[in-house]
């Protein structure tokens, strides 16, 4: 399931993040890529232990917890500390799949990357290229969202970022281990949650509401791993 979260950050929050990121000490992104990925990766990243990366990362994690849409769609168990990247001057990242398991820096913990997230800090007109292309069985999906918007897509997807030929593309990216490992099951729960919200709004007195909610929670009980 691919899903956008519009307006995840406000315009003012984006402006502050961007201002800080533009002065940040960017490093060659190949440092954190595996052998195969390093051959197709040409971008810049902040070191995971960079103080700014930590500060902005904590800020994003806090926002995630307050986003109903994120919580309902991702059903998060663990979230990897957000990372930051910049593409400019032809920077690109060819087709790859992300690692299945990530170590959480400075801890003994590991996270399975069920869901990938990209949060955009620049508007589409600020740069040329830089589309996130995600492939699934329905074909290729091109994503280039306004600043402050976020996209979630399955960690299993092959994906790439097309070359940025003008301007710069700043983004945060991170991975989520979900309570529900299977994308298809998460998608069903998401659809059901959305439908229940509608029924609650349109027919708040209906006896169908508690019954549907029971089905939702009982499915989650069956499928969740904590
Ligand atoms: Ni990737």
Image (cartoon, rainbow, N blue to C red):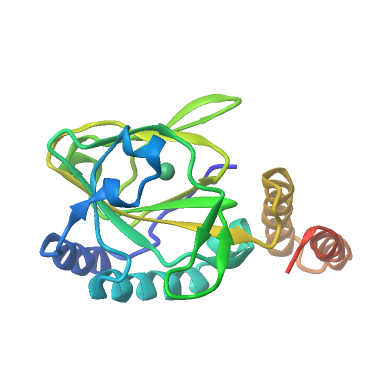
Instruction: Locate ligand 1 by image quadrant.
Output: top left
**Residue 193 falls left or right of residue 142:** right
Q: Quadrant of the N terminus?
A: top right
Q: Is residue 151 above or below residue 164?
A: below
Which corner quadrant of the image does residue 2 belong to? top right
Q: Is residue 49 above or below residue 173?
A: below
x%, y% of residue 107? Answer: 49, 75
Q: Residue at x 67, y 55 (%)?
A: 194
x%, y% of residue 34? Answer: 40, 44
**Residue 112 falls left or right of residue 197:** left
**Residue 168 falls left or right of residue 116:** left
Q: Is residue 58 above or below residue 186?
A: below
The answer to whether residue 133 of the structure is visible from this angle is no
Residue sitting at the far front: 35
Q: Residue at x 73, y 69 (%)?
A: 226
x%, y% of residue 213? Answer: 81, 65
Number of marks in picture: 0
Which corner quadrant of the image does residue 180 belong to? bottom right
Q: Is residue 41 above or below residue 120?
A: above
The answer to whether residue 38 of the structure is visible from this angle is yes
**Residue 115 falls left or right of residue 200:** left
Q: Residue at x 49, y 56 (%)?
A: 175
């Amino acid at each position: 399931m691919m899903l956008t979260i519009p307006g995840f950050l406000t315009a003012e929050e984006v402006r502050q993040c961007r201002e800080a990121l533009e002065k940040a000490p960017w490093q060659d992104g190949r440092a954190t890529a595996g052998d195969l990925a390093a051959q197709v990766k040409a971008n810049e990243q902040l070191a995971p232990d960079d103080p700014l990366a930590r500060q902005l990362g904590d800020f994003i994690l806090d926002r995630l917890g307050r986003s109903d849409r994120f919580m309902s769609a991702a059903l998060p168990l663990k979230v990897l500390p957000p990372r930051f990247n910049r593409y400019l001057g032809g920077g690109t990242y060819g087709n790859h799949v992300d690692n299945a398991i990530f170590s959480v820096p400075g801890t003994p913990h590991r996270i399975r990357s069920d869901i990938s997230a990209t949060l955009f800090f620049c508007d589409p007109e600020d740069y040329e290229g830089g589309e996130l292309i995600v492939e699934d069985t329905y074909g290729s999906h091109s994503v280039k969202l306004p600043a402050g918007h976020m996209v979630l897509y399955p960690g299993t997807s092959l994906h790439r970022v097309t070359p940025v030929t003008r301007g710069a593309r700043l983004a945060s990216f991170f991975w989520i281990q979900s309570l529900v490992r299977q994308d298809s099951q998460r998608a069903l729960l998401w659809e059901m949650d959305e439908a229940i919200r509608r029924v609650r709004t349109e027919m708040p007195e209906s006896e169908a509401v508690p019954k549907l909610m029971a089905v939702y929670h009982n499915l989650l009980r069956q499928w969740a791993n904590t």
